[in-house]
Image (cartoon, rainbow, N blue to C red):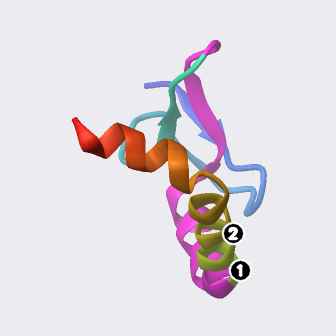
């Protein structure tokens, strides 16, 4: 099985969806850091992430309202 090294912790893990998140978009691929590091980052920066999401909702309030009117 193929392995990938996490860019944050340096640990070598099997390359699958249990260990790395899948990124959809123009170039579909696995993220460069493992799920454990991603959880750790989210926990450390929880308040900052919530504030950022809140500001995005406020900026796009009209567009979001149009989507939910249907």
The answer to whether 68 appears left or right of 24 in the picture is left
Would you say the residues marked 1 and 2 are in contact, meaning their CB atoms lie under 8 Å apart? yes
Q: Quadrant of the N terminus?
A: top left
**Residue 43 shown in magenta:** yes
Q: Quadrant of the C terminus?
A: top left
Seen in the picture, residue 6 relative to 41 is either above or below; the reply is above
Estimate the x, y position of residue 21 in percent, counting from the top left: 49, 43
**Mark 1 Cα within 10 Å, few/some/many (few <14, many 20+)?**
few
What residue appears at the point 67 percent right and 68 percent down from the top-left corner?
A: 55
- Report which quarter residue 41 is drawn in: bottom right
Point out residue 15 in the picture as x, y percentages from the top left corner. 49, 34
Front of the two marks 1 and 2: 2
Count neighbours of disc 2 (C-alpha within 10 A) and say few if under 14, some if 14 to 19, many if 20 or more. few
Q: Which residue is mark 1?
A: 48
Magenta part of the chain: 26-47
Query: Which secondary structure lies at badge 1?
Result: helix
Disc 2 is placed on an element classified as helix
- Which of 45/50 is in front? 50
Q: Which residue is mark 2?
A: 52
């Amino acid at each position: 099985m193929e392995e990938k090294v996490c860019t944050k912790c340096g640990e070598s893990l099997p390359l699958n969806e249990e260990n790395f998140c899948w990124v959809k978009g123009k170039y579909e691929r696995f993220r460069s850091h493992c799920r454990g590091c991603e959880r750790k980052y989210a926990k450390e920066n929880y308040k900052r992430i919530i504030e950022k999401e809140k500001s995005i909702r406020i900026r796009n309030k009209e567009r979001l309202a149009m989507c939910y009117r249907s």
